[in-house]
Amino acid sequence: MLKSQMKMKTNHETQTVSVRSLVEFVLQAGDLTPGGFQRRDRAQLGTQGHQRVQRSRPEGYETEIEIAYQVEDVDPPLEVRGRIDGLYASAAPVIIEEIKTTTLSLELIHEEHNLLHWGQAQCYAFMYAQQHNLSEISIHLTYYHLDTQKEKTFERYFSFAELQTFFSDLITPYLDWFRKIQTWQAQRDQSIQALDFPYEAYRPGQREMAVAVYKAIRDQERLYVQSPTGVGKTIAALFPAVKALGLGLADKIFYLTAKTPGRLVAEGALDDLRQVNLRFKSVTLTAKEKICFCPPVNCDPEVCVFARNYFGKVKRALEEIDQHDAFTRPVIEQIARQYEICPFEFSLDLALWGDGIICDYNYAFDPRVYLHRFFDFDTEAYIFLVDEAHNLPDRARAMYSAELDKQTVLALRRALKAHLPGLAKKLSAINKLLLEKRQACQAAGQQALIEYEPPEKLLKALREFNQKAEDWLVLNQPAEFRQDLLEFYFACNNYLRTAEYFDTYYVSYFERQSQGALKAKLFCLDPAPMLAARLDRCQAAIFFSATLLPLDYFMKLLTGAADHPKQVFPSPFPTENVSLLIHNGIATQYARRADSYAAIASLIETICRAQVGNYLVFFPSYAYLAAVLDLLQERLPQGQLLVQDRGMTEGARAAFLEQFSTGNQETLVGLAVMGGIFGEGIDLVGERLIGAVVVGVGVPQVCLENDLIKAYFDQQNGRGFAYAYQYPGFNRVLQATGRVIRTETDRGIIVLMDERFTQARYRRLFPVHWRGFQIVQSEGEIEEQLAYFWSRA
Ligand code: SF4
């Protein structure tokens, strides 16, 4: 509903609303989108078009005139602000010009083409006439065609009385909404002032973390918090952030997560605060593909009823804002169904009025999907709470990288050849360049060609293809190949945009694949400079995780700066509740792996026989898992083994976890892969999981990209192997072992199998709560240690 800026400050100073937002809020009507395609550089061309029209005007014509109008009798004061495109102040009567650029044929544009355009111009005319005591004024509404560079102008005269009536009709409904929001915010702030911590007592470390978060927000800092499971970090981050909001230190909280479970935990924490009388409107954003009522996503109002007359219906739906404080996915879906509107677009509209937004990292950091409505305008006082922040570097690398593959180029060329030969020819040019790269790889006997400059020739060919593709796409004609063309167009777009970021922390590579295929990728080696630019959108950012270790490594990858405050908290759980054993008689390096299978299978049997219960065993790869499984099947009954499959669905994942029940009479051993769907974000409390075995140090597979990262950081700080392999691997180990002790009453065992764990370079990484580890070298020792541990139950 509100595509442009429309924000209110939470303090009691003058509030502002832009002319555009005001007009859209009251007058916008009709379908969600025409379902049409728009040029990539539409915004840039629009600005240039505006300037061209302005330059063509005669002397005495003024441009970009800032104007503001103070609305009377409102508390807090409200100011309407905007900028007039063009003004003939010496004409009689004075002329205000509103300029709009278009790609639609001017013949199709009539005077009533878009009432919002007249609405904006009338607003400016009213504000100007009022300021200069004019009794009448003329409006020119000019449409400028971006391709033909021709223009069409409509002219209307208004008396001041007419403009006054128009403005009054516009501001009145807006003021109703404004007062409603103000009343709400006053209630919210009052509730925050009286708000106490929602639980009986702080857990060890929790209060300190909350204080550190509050100070970082107050001081507009970036704070890093390593806080083990059990500290209760979600509430320790949210509680001070909410308090800061109530004190006017911030306007909005973005709780940014890597995965859905993180969003649910944040919703739960806010619910707990509401139990102690917090009034706080939170909106959870769910990906369009997931929440869409009409999959597969096609937002053409001809196809989707939820896009039809969206703007006509959403105003009533927004009135429901009174009825709920927590706009979770089910609540959004229920209201969207009731009013027959798109749930995704509705969640975005609600977010404008929410105090907190719970969403994926993408919405703040990804150049393809970030929330323009918040971040493209003057930055307000936003707080970013970045949950499970150890995930962000890898996610960011993916967001700021782009790739194309040769096979897609060939397939699309085949599909287009008979219909759009000109476009097929452009694809041939791209294919030829990719082929040359492949041949160069082959000639050099290499798997990949690495370049430290953007691939200019390829970029030129992609640009030419995209311009031509746009010419066809903008006609919005149906065709069998349209979707494939559109997808490749967006992939090229992403590649071209990423090339604009290319810098010393980027590399371009061409990697040979099987059967003549080739991958062309612009790979972001270091996400910190890219993230830093996005972090400028917020006033304070808190990065927190149970496994933000080593901290310096994450600080380097998240912001590149080492001088931000950081906090490391110990585990609040009694150390005697866990037995941490390191078996350093096992070698899991690739070359020695095969020798370890039998010993590992035997050790797993020994561990599980020491105590009946549920265990998870984590392997470095599926192949390793399968090799040990073969031997384990001879040792443990089939019914006691559960195996993670590749590509498990959400349902299969849930079914797997359900078997970890406290009611199990026999031992259950789940075999999983480190860094996979069971290696993180699962919460098997109490006896649902009594032990974890980790095979290997988690080092990711040696591959081209990891080697490139290694080479880059070798050059940066001489720690390439650590940055590319050791630290990411150890993070997986920490995540896997973190599944065992989830509450202060949980008891369990952790067994690490790899000789490298006892080396100094690994021991340096151990979190404080690992201090009591025991080194074992034989099955007998393990048996003894475990017997002792379980006997103390
Ligand atoms: S319901 Fe789906 S198809 Fe319809 S407008 Fe929303 S996202 Fe688009």
Image (cartoon, grey):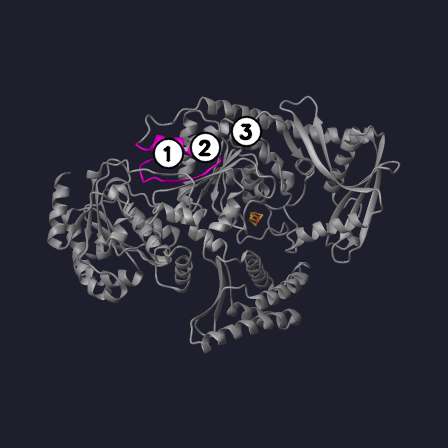
**Side (left or right) of 295 relative to 712:** right
Task: Tell us which disc is closer to us: 1 or 2.
Answer: 1
Inspect the image, locate mark 1, and give the three-letter code of the amino acid beneath it. Met
The answer to whether the residue labelled 2 contacts the one labelled 3, judged by CB atoms less than 8 Å apart, is: no
In the image, 172 versus 214, the foreground residue is 214
Quick check: is 507 in the magenta stretch?
no
Quick check: is 218 in the magenta stretch?
yes
Q: In the picture, residue 186 is in which quadrant?
A: top right
Please give the residue where the numbered disc 3 appears in the rendered image. 322
* Disc 1/disc 2 C-alpha distance (Å): 12 Å
Task: Tell us which disc is closer to us: 2 or 3.
Answer: 2
Residue at (14, 42) in percent of width and height: 790
Task: Write the start and end of the magenta stretch as one range.
Answer: 204-233
Residue 207 image offset from top left, x and y in percent: 35, 30
Inspect the image, locate mark 3, and give the three-letter code of the amino acid beneath it. Asp
Task: Tell us which disc is closer to us: 1 or 3.
Answer: 1
Q: Is mark 1 within 8 Å of ligand 1?
A: no
Residue 435 image offset from top left, x and y in percent: 52, 74
Residue at (10, 53) in percent of width and height: 780
Residue 202 image offset from top left, x and y in percent: 33, 29
**Element type at marker 3?**
helix
- Marks counted in the figure total 3
Residue at (22, 63) in percent of width and height: 630
Please give the residue where the numbered disc 2 appears in the rendered image. 241
Inspect the image, locate mark 2, and give the three-letter code of the amino acid beneath it. Ala
Q: Is residue 294 above or below residue 68?
A: below
Please give the residue where the numbered disc 1 appears in the rendered image. 209
> Reading the chain from its start, which is encountered first: label 1 or label 3?
1
